[in-house]
Image (cartoon, rainbow, N blue to C red):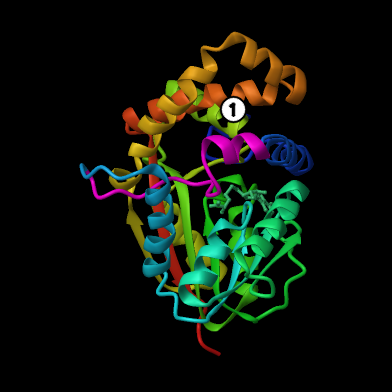
Amino acid sequence: MATARPDDPGALAFAGEERELHDSIRRHYDGLIDLYEELWGEHIHHGYWDPGVPAGRHAAQARMVDEVAAFGGLARECRVADLGCGIGATGIHLAGKLGCRVDGVTLSVAQVRRGRQKVRQAGAVGQVEFVLADALRTPLAEGSYDVVWSLESCELMPDKLAFLREGLRLLKPGGQLVVATWCSRDAALTPQETTLLRRIYRDFAAAYVLPLDAYRTLCGEAGFEAIDTADWTEQARATWNLSVDIVKPFVRNASFIWRLVREKGTDTFRFLNSVPLMKRAYDQGLMHYGVFRARRPAA
Ligand code: SAH
């Protein structure tokens, strides 16, 4: 159990300033946009594997979208608010497969630009749109979405309850929230685990994670009903074995690193370095992959 100082909120709370967090999120996603796409591909999230069954990383990332969509019970042609939308890969996928209309929200202007370009290339203009805004206070219309979707953005939100309340506000009565997010194993962390999580937060510009169970309580507090959770750690963990292999040649190439640091600043180096940290957090059983769904009560 962590022996935190009385003034130390530990690793399962947000300790900083929201403005600084947003600045570092913008620096992270604006600055690393090319590298993310080059190394990770268009989806900025874990893959989903049947444990022990090999599959390519990009196929596993697309499968994750399908699995979250199935878990969230997305119907054909539903309207989706994608809070923390990256470069729109989810929106384009859902528009193509299910005919959804998707409004994506991101803090990164570079992601909005790249997303719009990708939507044009995919022939999905009018089906997938982007808004540069804070997901905690979006300009999107109240009560106008069948689904509020968050795929690996909740860990970046400094106020989880405000995030869930904004989700509730956007949903039509009876609408569905579905979230996939990094979680801690539980709330009883050792000092070493706290330190590891904090390094991960810094390197990925994340706010903090919570145990999956905590979201059950928070969803209830926000006013949701029919709350369900599932732990997909075993389905997602292969992401980090593959990622470590992907970044290894880059990290070992000193001239590549220096060029990147000169061009993009030290955040880039941190980002590459953070990949083995995530693998360690999974290997130690500290990091879990959680999904939850909840319904806005019918009027
Ligand atoms: N869901 C996407 C991207 C995940 S990366 C995918 O799976 O590909 C995290 C995303 O959350 C980034 O687009 C980042 O800009 C966004 N984000 C983080 N905090 C946010 C906030 N407060 N408001 C809006 N977007 C935010």
Judge whether 122 appears above or below 80 on screen. Answer: above
**Going by the picture, which residue comes out furthest to the left?**
52
SS at mark 1?
helix
**Quadrant into which the N terminus falls:** top left
Classified by dominant secondary structure, the portion drawn in magenta counts as loop
Whether residue 135 is visible: no
| Disc 1 crowd, CA 10 A, few/some/many (<14, 14-19, 20+) | many
Q: In this view, does 48 lie to the left or right of 17?
A: left
Q: In this view, does 49 lie to the left or right of 165?
A: left
**Going by the picture, which residue comes out furthest to the top?**
254
Q: Position of residue 62 (x, y in %)?
A: 43, 55
Q: Magenta region: which residues? A: 33-51
Per the image, the residue denoted by label 1 is 271
Q: In this view, does 289 lie to the left or right of 176?
A: left
Name the amino acid type tagged 1: Phe
Judge whether 118 appears above or below 125 on screen. Answer: above
Residue 119 inside the magenta-drawn segment: no
Q: Position of residue 31 (x, y in %)?
A: 72, 35
Toward which corner of the image does residue 65 lie, by quadrant?
bottom left
Q: Position of residue 38 (x, y in %)?
A: 57, 37
Q: Position of residue 178 (x, y in %)?
A: 47, 65
Question: How many numbered marks are there?
Answer: 1
Judge whether 175 appears above or below 21 on screen. Answer: below
For image coordinates 36% across by 30% down, the residue present is 241
